[in-house]
């Protein structure tokens, strides 16, 4: 993916399983670039809305769905 182009990733695991996503490092412009992490393929069940720099690993897990969606939104004003 290109840092300045919006994109979406879908992570799908077996039925009756949960999705776990680990962000090792995030380097984004604070309050301009956002990584949104959602539970499910559609809908607005937001797990995390990340921006800025996060030098420490963070883990995100769905509560009940076997699908997680990550949206990269650069240059949002």
Image (cartoon, helix red, strand yellow):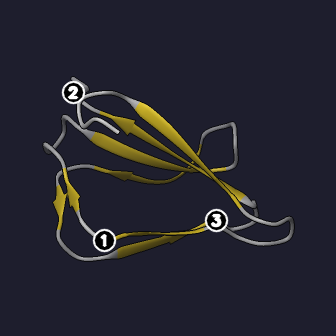
**For this view, does 38 lie left or right of residue 17?**
left
Q: Is residue 48 above or below residue 31?
A: below
- Pointer 1 and pointer 2: residues touching (CB < 8 Å)? no
Residue under numbered circle 3:
62
- Callout 1: SS: loop
Residue under numbered circle 2:
75
**For this view, does 40 lie left or right of residue 7?**
right
Earlier sequence position, callout 1 versus callout 3: 1
Q: Which residue is located at x 64 percent, y 65 percent? A: 62
In the image, 53 versus 5, the foreground residue is: 5
Q: Quadrant of residue 58?
A: bottom left
State the quadrant of the C terminus: top left
Q: Is residue 76 above or below residue 53?
A: above
Earlier sequence position, callout 1 versus callout 2: 1
Q: Which residue is located at x 43 percent, y 45 percent? A: 36
Q: CA distance from mark 1 to mark 3?
A: 18 Å
Residue under numbered circle 1:
24
State the quadrant of the N terminus: top left
């Amino acid at each position: 993916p290109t840092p300045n182009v919006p994109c979406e990733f879908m992570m799908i695991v077996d039925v009756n399983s949960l999705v776990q996503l680990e962000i090792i490092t995030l380097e984004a412009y604070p309050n301009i670039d956002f990584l949104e992490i959602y539970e499910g393929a559609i809908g607005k069940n937001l797990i995390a809305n990340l921006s800025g720099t996060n030098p420490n690993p963070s883990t995100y897990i769905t509560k009940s769905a076997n699908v997680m969606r990550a949206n990269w939104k650069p240059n949002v004003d």
